[in-house]
Image: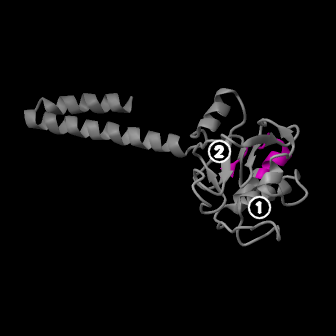
């Protein structure tokens, strides 16, 4: 609607002088490109931006809102999910620390299994820290409706309502610490597990 009105006004102005027409067409093109890039940015970093989250939305599964740093759950989600999201938010900004979160629950940094263990513990779903290879046998097999753990020997990450919590962006090294990652990654070679009932 806005673009249509803008084009009509520009075309009226362009009747005044042919050079003005070229200028108007250029401005309209720039305006359309600006709107397109803002839309694609929102899609890229929004809650439903990842392939997994988009799948959740298509299948009427719960999706978290993501503001670029923190995740936000809707109040109608189960309490363990609300507590898991809150715990994941507390980890944002913590650095990667090998072994972090295993000796001390509240540590100065966290590794992959320490991060997942922290979130599951605060959700009331795990009594204490576990290593990535131990999390391959956690809970029930397969993806969960709300929470899914992706584990293999050497690395583990989790997805809560389609938003990934991981210490590395695409599995390239140790990464920068636990962060909400709105981008999808391959889970080939990982065991998918979920807390019973979730």
Is 78 contained in the magenta span?
A: yes
Image position of 166 (left or right of 137): left
Residue 22 at x, y = what percent? 15, 35
Q: Which mark is residue 42?
A: none
Check whether the beta carbons of the residues at disc 1 and disc 2 lie within 8 A of each other: no
Would you name the residue on which mark 1 appears?
114
Q: Is residue 168 above or below residue 110?
A: above
Residue 101 at x, y = what percent? 78, 66
Q: Residue at x 87, y 43 (%)?
A: 139
Q: Is residue 50 above or below residue 126?
A: above
Whole-angstrom CA distance, mark 1 to mark 2, is 24 Å
Residue 55, by quadrant, is: top right
Q: Secondary structure at mark 1?
A: helix
Q: Nearer the viewer, residue 142 or 183?
A: 142
Q: Residue at x 57, y 45 (%)?
A: 183
Q: Residue at x 74, y 68 (%)?
A: 100
Q: Residue at x 79, y 37 (%)?
A: 144
Q: Which callout, 1 or 2, points at the residue further toward the start of the chain?
A: 2
Is 137 contained in the magenta span?
A: no
Residue at the far right in the pictured view: 127
Q: Is residue 105 visible?
A: yes
Bounds of the magenta segment = 71-84
Would you name the residue on which mark 2 appears?
65
Residue 80 at x, y = what percent? 84, 47
Residue 54, by quadrant, is: top right
Give the number of callouts: 2
Residue 99 at x, y = what percent? 75, 67
Quarter of the image with the C terminus is top right
Q: Secondary structure at mark 2?
A: strand
Quarter of the image with the N terminus is top left
The residue carrying pointer 1 sits among few (fewer than 14), some (14 to 19) or many (20 or more) residues within 10 Å by Cα, namely many
């Amino acid at each position: 609607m806005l673009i249509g009105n803008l084009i009509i006004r520009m075309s009226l102005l362009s009747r005044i002088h042919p050079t003005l027409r070229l200028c108007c067409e250029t401005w309209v093109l720039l305006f359309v490109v600006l709107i397109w890039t803002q839309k694609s940015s929102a899609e890229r970093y929004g809650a439903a931006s990842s392939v997994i989250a988009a799948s959740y939305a298509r299948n009427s599964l719960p999706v978290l809102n993501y503001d670029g740093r923190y995740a936000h759950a809707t109040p109608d989600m189960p309490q363990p999910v609300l507590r898991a999201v809150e715990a994941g938010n507390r980890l944002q900004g913590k650095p990667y620390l090998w072994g972090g979160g295993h000796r001390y629950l509240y540590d100065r940094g966290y590794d992959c299994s320490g991060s997942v263990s922290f979130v599951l513990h605060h959700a009331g779903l795990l009594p204490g820290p576990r290593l990535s290879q131990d999390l391959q046998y956690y809970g029930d097999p397969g993806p969960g409706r709300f929470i899914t753990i992706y584990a293999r020997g050497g690395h583990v990450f989790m997805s809560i309502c389609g938003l990934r919590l991981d210490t590395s962006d695409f599995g390239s090294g140790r990464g920068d610490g636990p962060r909400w990652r709105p981008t999808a990654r391959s889970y080939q070679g990982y065991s998918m597990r979920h807390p019973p009932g979730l």
